[in-house]
Amino acid sequence: MSAREQVEFLAGSRHRVAVAECLREGPARPSELEEQIGASRATVQRALSGLSERDWVRKRTGEYRLTAAGRLVLRAYGEFVAVAETVDAVSGPLALLDPAVEDPPIAAVRAATVTVADATSPHAPIERYAEALRGADVDLFCGVSPIYSTVFEEIHQPLLDADVPVEVVVDEATYEVALQRETAIVDAARGESFDLYVSPEPLGIGLSLFDGRAFVGAYDGEGRLRACIDGTGDPLREWVRSEYRCRRERARLVEPP
């Protein structure tokens, strides 16, 4: 029997999964399993028969026990279900991140907060971001911005006013816009506490790290922020930090005059 057939067998019946999950808690008789999962004797017996054929459960002195193989299979199945549920919850934002990032670690987004713009709350992602930044105690800000936005400039202006150390990566097109408009970012880059990096490649993603929090911004083809993923968990912060450093390393530092 192939591995695919084994997966299909377990996933093909909620009762098989339920029986295995019950036995993970400890040995049980068929009558006890019937009561625990709310299924008929025939259903439980069929599930036990199939699980036994695969040596995922064994019968001993009238009770069924989950084997080591059964525990491994059940654990892997549970992990797959958790991944599928997470992907389903964030599929929209993840789609907007393509192809700017590849294979974001599932642990990074599993415990994160996802904020999506919709018809009733078109500015929800930027409002979420602004609120978090306003309430933060920032001693270092690191960011990546694929666009120039006066709204973002206003949100970050308090950092510049407070002379907080800032590192920002933008792409060539965004830098040209900032130069033409003589923005606050360009002025700040002439100071000692602001490092501006220019990437030779389009960035396609927004990243921010501050006060133990990480943000990922997902943009549409018109350069509008459509969703953000944020959190304080180590997996998310480590992933965002890695993505930020990769982009900074490929960018050139704008030297102050």
Image: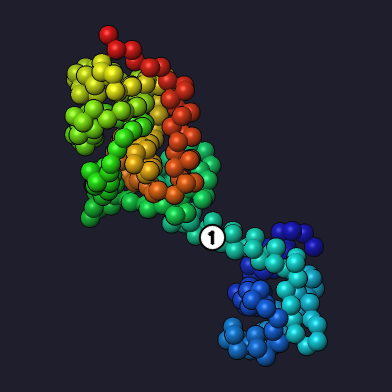
Task: Give the x, y percent position of residue 241.
Answer: 45, 36
- Residue 8 seen in render: no
Question: Residue 75's quadrant in the figure?
Answer: bottom right
Task: Tell me the quarter of the picture where residue 52 sits.
Answer: bottom right
Q: Is residue 159 left or right of residue 44?
A: left
The three-letter code of the residue at mark 1 reads: Ala
Q: In this view, does 55 lie above or below 183?
A: below
The type of colouring in the image is rainbow
The residue lying at 78 percent from left, 88 percent from top is: 62
Q: How many neighbours does mark 1 have within 10 angstroms: few (below 14), some (14-19), or many (20 or more)? A: some
State the image quarter where residue 175 is shown. Answer: top left
Q: Where does residue 116 sit, x and y in percent of width and height?
A: 32, 50
Residue sitting at x 41%, y 17%: 252
Rendered residue at 51%/50% (across/down): 107
Q: Dot 1 corresponds to which residue? A: 82
Residue at screen point 37% across, 47% down: 230
Q: Nearer the viewer, residue 213 or 143?
A: 213
Establish if 147 lies above or below 82: above
Query: From the viewer's perspective, is residue 255 above or below residue 236?
Result: above
Q: Position of residue 89 (x, y in %)?
A: 43, 57
| Left-right relation of 39 to 128 | right
Which quarter of the rendering shows the N terminus? bottom right
Observer-nearest of 95 and 207: 207
